[in-house]
Structure formats: C-alpha cells, structure tokens
Amino acid sequence: MNMIKDKRGVVFTIIAIVLAVFFTLIFSARVEKPLDYKTEILETRISVLSDYMNTFFDYAEGTASIAGYSALRGIIINISNSGEYNPDFETQFAYCVKTGNLTSANICPNMTNSSLTHFLDQLRNIAEDELNINSNYTINHVSVNQTTDAFSVEVILNLSVKVNDAYANISDTRVLVSSISINGLLDPMYLLNGAYNQTIKAYELEGNWTYVDLQQLYNTHAYRRYGEGVSFINRIKGDLTPGDSYGIESFVNYTHPDVNYNESYSMIDYLFWQNITDCSSTNPVIAINDNASFPAKGSQYFQLNDWHRLEFSILNYTVYPCP
Amino acid sequence: MNKRGAYFFVIDALIAASVIFISLIIIFTSHRMVPESSPSLRMIEDYMDFLTTTKVNQFQGGYVTSLNITGSDNTLLEQLVEFYYYNTSSNDTSQIMWNFTREISKGVVPDQRGLIVYINDSINNRYSLIYNRSVSPMEKSSLVLSSKRVIFKKITNETNTIIYGPVILNVKVWV
C-alpha cells in the first residue's frame, strides 16, 4: 500500500513536468510579436527610399551642370564646323543636354556618355542592382537662361522621380537650377568673326577699374563684366548688338599677325570684329601712347573709344579724328 | 506514515509548481530577447545618417583635423568618396581612408561590434575594402546587419569639374 502511495507521488511529479513541457511548447510555438514589430524596419526602409530620392535630385542637379557644360562645348564645336552662329541655341541646348543630340537628325558633338539621360540611367540602374530600389524619372522640361552672372549660365531642369519597392511608393517633382561656368569655353565671336581663337577667362575685380586692370585684361586675354557688352548666349546666337545686362568684353590683340589694323577701330572685341568704328565727337577713338604696356606695332597703337578710356582713367592718349 | 505521506505530497507539489514557474520565467525572458536586432538596426542607420549629415569642419577628431582638408564643407561621406576617387586616379590614399573611417566610427559604432566598410564602384568594376574592425569573425556571427547608400561627389580640379560616381557605400556591423 505504501509502495502505491510512493508511486503516486512520482506520477504527480511526472504530470507536473509534462504540463511544464506542454506550456513551454504552447508558448514557444506562438512567440508573441507586438503589432508594430515591423514598423521600425519599414521606417528604416522608407528612410532609405527617401534618402535615395533626395540623392537622385542632387545627382540630377550636379550632372545637369556637367551635361550642360559638355553641351555648350558641343554647340560651339558645331558652330565651328558649320561656320554659322546658332540662333536656335536655347532649343538645341536643351535637347542636347537631355538626349545628346542637337536635333532629332543631328548629333551634338562632345556628348558621348555625357547627356543627362545617360547619367540618370546610370544611377537608376545602380539603385536597382545594388539597393533593390526601382526608380523612374521623367525630364519634363530643360531650359537655359542667364540671370545671375555674366560668367555663368543656368540650366533649369523640371524633373519628376518615382521611387518604389515592396513597402513604399514615393514620387516627387522638383525644379532644379544648375549653374554652369563659361570659363574655358571658346568665344564663338572670335571663332567666326575673329582672326584667331580665344577662350573665355574671367577677370574678377571688386572696385573701380584702373589702368593696371586694363593691362592685365589685355595681356592675359581675359574678359570683364560689362553691362553694355555682349553676353555669352548672344555671342552663340550671333546677336552681337551691345547692351546686355550680362554682357562681357575682351580686348583684341592688335599685334597678332592675322589681325587687320584700322586706326578707326576700338579694340573692344564686339566692336572690332564687326568693324564698328563707334566714333563720334563725344566718343572718339583714342590711341594709348604707352609703349611699355601696349607696344606699338609700327605706327599701330592700342586703341579704345573715349568712354572706355574714361572708365580706365587713362590720361596719356592721342585722339584720332573720326573718319 | 500518513503524516510522512502528506509531507511527501506537499514537497512534490512544491517541486511541480517550481518547475512550472521556472518554465514560465524562461518563456517570458526569451520573449524579451526577440527585438534584439532593432537597436542594432537603428544604430547602423544612425551611423549612416551621421556620415551623410556631418560636415568635415564640424568633426573635431584629431586625425581628421590633421589632414587639413581643403573642401571642409564636404560631409564625412563625401570626403571618403573624394579620397576614394584620388585613390583610383593618382594617389594611394588607402591608409588615409582606413584611419579616417576608424576615427569617424569611434564612439558611433560600439567597440564590441565588428565593422566593415566597402565602396563599390560598379561603373568601373571596383569593389574596395575601406576599413575592417573585427572583434569576432563576421562569418560566425548570428547577427550581421548591412546598410547601403548611393553616393557621388562633384570634384573640381585644375582643368575641369567632374561627377565621380555614383558608387555604393556598404557598411556591415555584427556582434
């Protein structure tokens, strides 16, 4: 009888262990997860998508500048090849930036692997391969303008981007403005009208112009901002009428062997290359008698119109009578 | 004898209750360990955010300051990509990248965690190890977290301006 009672105790112990194992299995089988257990992962993923979208727009802004510079070079090469200015500059530039072609029939020189579409496709493909992010973009509009500085033009890009993956779908449209420096580009006016070629190099000055600045401008073949000059865009289009807010000007190297000298000409580039004497009793052409700074070529001197002489505070000069 | 039997049953019941109680404690303790990866996930994303938002001139590390970086308006990540660009184009900057990454990771990624940083330039078919800090082998870790960011850098040199990239920065952290 006692043996039976002892065995009953063992049975109870075994039952307790079985119950413990039973409860353990029950609870382990359905590990409770909080309702928002995925929220953090989703937030992280959406944050990655959002960062990618911002990167896409930043990249588009940066590459628009690179593509724009290449397109400017391409259009200038095309001007050189055709021997004609490009009055349809804005339209052809936009098409060149976007596609790498000037028109549907003509390629834009210098644009191999440099169009905006090429750059953005590269980013899209890398995101798809490496980050498992699908992205599509639409270049709604590209335009070019000059509203801030004489030595840069702006590319204005209207871009829509859609980004999606298994968790989220984000889209946005932004207007991006990229600035392109024109330094280092060939001046189309010299290219077509001049006796030699010249690249644009900005001469930066804060304050008033002096005679020393004039020497620097002439000797380094640099350009200065001049509100009555001809802007870079108009130099491409062949609209060489002076008076642009963002005009620039340089001084013709009259000692160059290919330059035809004329004592009635001012050495201001847009006047000289268009054979404009711009001579009047109030604004005569003057010759600077300074052999050290502007060596005479025989009887040929560095010449300016009187308004420019005043601006550079030149005191030692000879007035030529207007023809 | 009956008295001894009663003791036996009481002790037996207590043992059974203890087994059940301990089992429940184990179960609920293991429940608390489930979201272990969450802080690590947040940590690696915070690290990425730190790299993409902190500018070089805001970072006070001794090594970074000693480099006298001219483009100090760069973010730490942009600077790393710029070093990488120079490494692939002209100069060997691999040691600079290693020391740079070690310093900008210090305190942000805890020392007891492994950290490895790669840059993948798939356009030019380059996949480079930038920095590796192994506390234990990554292959033996039960939890490896990885985060990738696409990055590019506008680089202006004497002759022209280029966009280097896009490249992928790949960061892995493990315990």
Image (tube, rainbow, N blue to C red):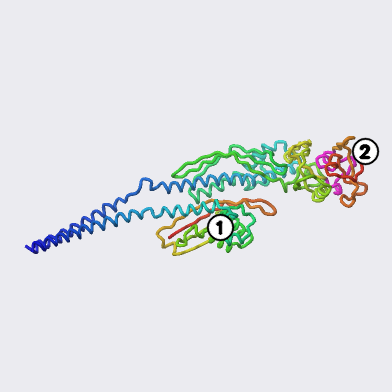
Label 1 environment density (alpha carbons within 10 Å; few <14, some 14–19, many ≥20)? few
Side of A208 relative to B26 (left or right): right
Inspect the image, locate mark 2, and give the three-letter code of the amino acid beneath it.
Pro
Side of B99 relative to A153 (left or right): left
Q: Nearer the viewer, mark 1 or mark 2?
A: 2
Look at the numbered discs 1 and 2 and tell me whether their residues touch, using CB distance below 8 Å: no
Asked which quadrant contains residue A61, the reply is top right
Identify the residue position indicated by label 1 in the image: B126
Element under disc 2: loop
Region rendered in magenta = A252-275
Label 2 environment density (alpha carbons within 10 Å; few <14, some 14–19, many ≥20)? few
Element under disc 1: strand
Q: Is residue A134 magenta?
A: no
Question: Which residue is pictured at 46% across the width and 48% down the height?
Answer: A44
Asked whether residue A288 appears in the rendered view, the answer is: yes
Q: Quadrant of the N terminus of chain A?
A: bottom left
Inspect the image, locate mark 1, and give the three-letter code of the amino acid beneath it.
Arg
Q: Chain of mark 1?
A: B
Asked which quadrant contains residue A87, the reply is top right
Q: Chain of mark 2?
A: A
Q: Nearer the viewer, residue A296 or B106?
A: B106
Side of B170 relative to A150 (left or right): left
Q: Position of residue B19 (x, y in %)?
A: 23, 59
Q: Position of residue A82 (x, y in %)?
A: 74, 41
Main SS of residues in magenta: loop
Q: Nearer the viewer, residue B146 or B12?
A: B12
Q: Is residue A267 magenta?
A: yes
Identify the residue position indicated by label 2 in the image: A321
Q: Quadrant of the C terminus of chain A?
A: top right
Q: Position of residue A136 (x, y in %)?
A: 53, 42
Q: Position of residue A20 (x, y in %)?
A: 23, 56
